């Protein structure tokens, strides 16, 4: 079978006399209108033997990849339509996440949004936001919380999933602790949901300690089994803290055999970040523990490949730093209608609040999102770091960069550092 072109994930910005493609990998490339249309139309086509200069350049810079089953990074037809809409300053959006509630039956130690059972749900026009996101070509929708599958909110979730499917979203993901998945899995699938992301944090009572819920481990595994039975894709997300770092290998060995049935199922490890309920730092990983996590995941990568992932689904085992795509191709709206680059930044780096403005107007404002839609050279201290921890802290996560170093873009020397010897030399501490 001849392989076809697959477009990568990137943002398209309109400038006064040209278009810019901004890649999360850190590159910025200029195109005129004719060339940008040609580039977009390459997707899903078999490459010819004679390649145009544009084609060669795009391939070389990583904007086009080869794949036997091309997957769209956004709704390409809608992005092509946006080229003709002079009011659109940014033409693209890949991922939209909505935190529809912060009410939750768990009280997790590392919850980034500080969810809990006493939280109230606000009245936000989620259908308008979902529709607006689709107008920029958004193809992935995440519905999160809190716990979005609480019985008093399930009908809203089903309604939003059905609506998102009509708007052209191909991937609809529910983030849940697993408690109610067995009850609603079939209904979720019928509504258009494609994946369930279930939290699981450890064995031998650790899940119960972390979530402060007596049946946390049972709920996670019940949800995992129900997801697989319903024929939905599965992601198991494990937040790694001081309390369960020693269980990482055990978790891999126990869960991989369960999720191996479908190539789209995977296990993701996310180091806890000191935000929300994790701000007390008691459970945060030390530099040695960060490196231990990286080492363990690297050990099992050759055998299991993409079945095991680290942080925001990005590959952490490359030599060159890869910038995160928060605010560039991803946006999140919380339960109050506040728009942010990602859930970790929704409380410390909000962009704007939906009120008199629509999602369209806010996402279209390149000035407000400036720090996320440009590439700034990394400062010399971090750029020259040879420690493996740089694969997480240099450009991998803007939230971590802001919290640990005081700069979203790593263009300033860090006030804090994850590398002990630098802390000692500079007189700073983690």
Image (tube, grey):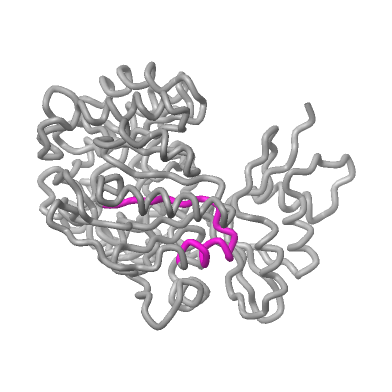
Residue occupying image coordinates x 61% and y 75%: 88
- x, y percent for residue 340: 37, 65
- Numbered disc total: 0
- x, y percent for residue 305: 48, 26
Could you tell me if residue 153 is visible in this image? yes
The residues colored magenta run 129-145
**105 to 88, vertically: above or below:** above
**350 to 120, vertically: above or below:** below
**164 to 46, vertically: above or below:** below
- x, y percent for residue 118: 12, 56
Could you tell me if residue 425 is visible in this image? no
Q: Nearer the viewer, residue 288 or 353?
A: 353
Tell me where residue 404 sits by quadrant.
Answer: bottom left
Residue occupying image coordinates x 34% and y 69%: 337
Residue occupying image coordinates x 70% and y 47%: 60
Q: Nearer the viewer, residue 425 or 373?
A: 373
Say whether residue 143 is magenta.
Answer: yes
């Amino acid at each position: 079978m001849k392989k076809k072109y697959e477009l990568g994930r990137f943002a398209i910005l309109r400038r006064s006399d040209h278009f810019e493609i901004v890649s999360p990998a850190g590159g910025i490339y200029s195109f005129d209108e004719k060339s940008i249309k040609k580039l977009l139309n390459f997707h899903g086509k078999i490459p010819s033997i004679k390649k145009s200069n544009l084609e060669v350049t795009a391939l070389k810079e990583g904007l086009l990849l080869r794949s036997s089953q091309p997957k769209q990074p956004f709704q390409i037809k809608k992005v092509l339509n946006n080229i003709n809409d002079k009011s659109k300053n940014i033409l693209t959006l890949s991922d939209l996440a909505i935190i529809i509630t912060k009410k939750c039956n768990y009280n997790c130690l590392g919850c980034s949004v500080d969810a809990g059972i006493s939280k109230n749900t606000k009245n936000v026009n989620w259908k308008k936001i979902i529709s607006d996101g689709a107008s920029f070509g958004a193809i992935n929708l995440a519905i999160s919380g809190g716990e979005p599958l609480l019985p008093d909110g399930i009908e809203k979730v089903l309604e939003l999933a059905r609506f998102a499917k009509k708007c052209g979203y191909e991937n609809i993901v529910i983030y849940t602790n697993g408690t109610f998945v067995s009850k609603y899995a079939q209904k979720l699938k019928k509504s258009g949901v494609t994946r369930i992301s279930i939290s699981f944090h450890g064995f031998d009572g650790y899940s119960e300690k972390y979530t402060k819920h007596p049946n946390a481990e049972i709920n996670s595994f019940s949800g995992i089994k129900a997801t697989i039975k319903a024929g939905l894709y599965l992601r198991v997300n494990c937040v790694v803290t001081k309390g369960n770092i020693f269980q990482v290998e055990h978790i891999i060995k126990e869960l991989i055999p369960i999720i191996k049935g479908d190539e789209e199922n995977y296990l993701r490890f996310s180091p806890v970040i000191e935000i929300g309920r994790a701000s007390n730092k008691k459970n945060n990983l030390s530099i040695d523990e960060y490196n231990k996590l990286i080492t363990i995941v690297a050990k099992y990568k050759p055998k299991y490949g993409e079945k095991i992932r680290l942080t925001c689904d990005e590959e952490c085992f490359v030599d060159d730093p890869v910038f995160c795509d928060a605010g560039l191709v991803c946006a999140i709206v919380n339960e109050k209608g506040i728009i942010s680059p990602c859930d970790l930044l929704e409380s410390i780096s909000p962009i704007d609040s939906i009120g008199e403005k629509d999602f369209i107007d806010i996402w279209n404002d390149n000035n407000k999102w400036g720090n996320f839609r440009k590439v700034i050279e990394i400062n010399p201290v971090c750029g020259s770091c040879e420690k493996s921890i740089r694969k997480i802290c240099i450009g991998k996560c803007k939230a971590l960069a802001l919290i640990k170093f005081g700069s979203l873009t790593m263009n300033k020397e860090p006030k804090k550092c994850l590398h002990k010897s630098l802390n000692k030399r500079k007189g700073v501490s983690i």
